[in-house]
Image (tube, rainbow, N blue to C red):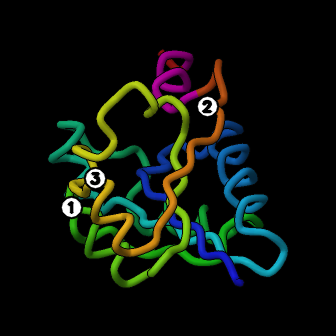
Amino acid sequence: MVRTVYTGGTFDLFHAGHANFLRQCSKIAGEDGFVVVALNTDEFVIEYKRKPPIYNYAERRDILQACKYVTYVYPNTGGADSKPAIEVIKPNIIVVGSDWAYRDYYDQMQFTQEWLDKKEIVLAYVPYTKGISTTEIKRRLV
């Protein structure tokens, strides 16, 4: 069975933590699988984080498409509701960082375990890369 891994996010100021996360997504997808990133739009980032990303959507998309671990970038036009993107992508697996393990990822993405079960989608957590983040990079620049 070909695996399609879905992950989503803003991926602003692409860094080693992002690359490590996407590498892990690629490992889960396997040699013949796909990694699809649902990339947050600028409008949603502004709404959610109350400030615009450093790189605009097109720049972030181009950076992700250049990453060897990413098969395809899809615009997350549903904003906080990830279901529309998931419905289009039809993943077998949704992968998120372990930093979400102690937060309500289901509420954040606006789906339930029951909804995932009906779609036969597995939710997997991969280790978060400590010591590097977009917030940390911004802090270093100041």
Work out whether mark 2 precedes mark 1 in sequence or the reverse, and give the earlier one. 1
Q: Does the magenta stretch include residue 136?
A: yes
Instruction: Look at the numbered disc 1 and give the secondary structure of its residue.
Output: loop
Q: Where is residue 93 in the image (x, y as percent from the top left)?
A: 55, 64
Position of residue 28 relative to residue 89, above or below, is above
Quick check: 94 left or right of 86? right
Mark-to-mark CA distance, 2 and 3: 18 Å
Circle on res. 109: 3
User: Mark 3 or mark 1, which has the lower sequence index?
Assistant: 1
Q: Where is residue 89 in the image (x, y as percent from the top left)?
A: 44, 80
* C-alpha separation, residue under disc 3 versus residue under disc 1: 6 Å
Give the magenta part as a residue range: 133-140
In the picture, residue 110 is in which quadrant?
bottom left
- The disc at residue 128 is 2
Q: Which residue is drawn at 60% across and 75% down?
A: 4
From the image, tell me which residue sits under label 1.
81
Near-viewer residue (47 or 107): 107
Kindly state the secondary structure of the residue where label 3 is placed.
helix
Residue at 48% over, 16% down: 139
| Depicted 6 relative to depicted 90: above or below | above
The x and y percentages for residue 3 are 66, 76
Picture coordinates of residue 114 (x, y %)? 29, 60
Which amino acid, mark 3? Met
Q: Residues within 10 Å of mark 1 (few under 14, many from 20)?
A: some
Label located before the other in sequence (2 or 3): 3
Amino acid under disc 2: Tyr
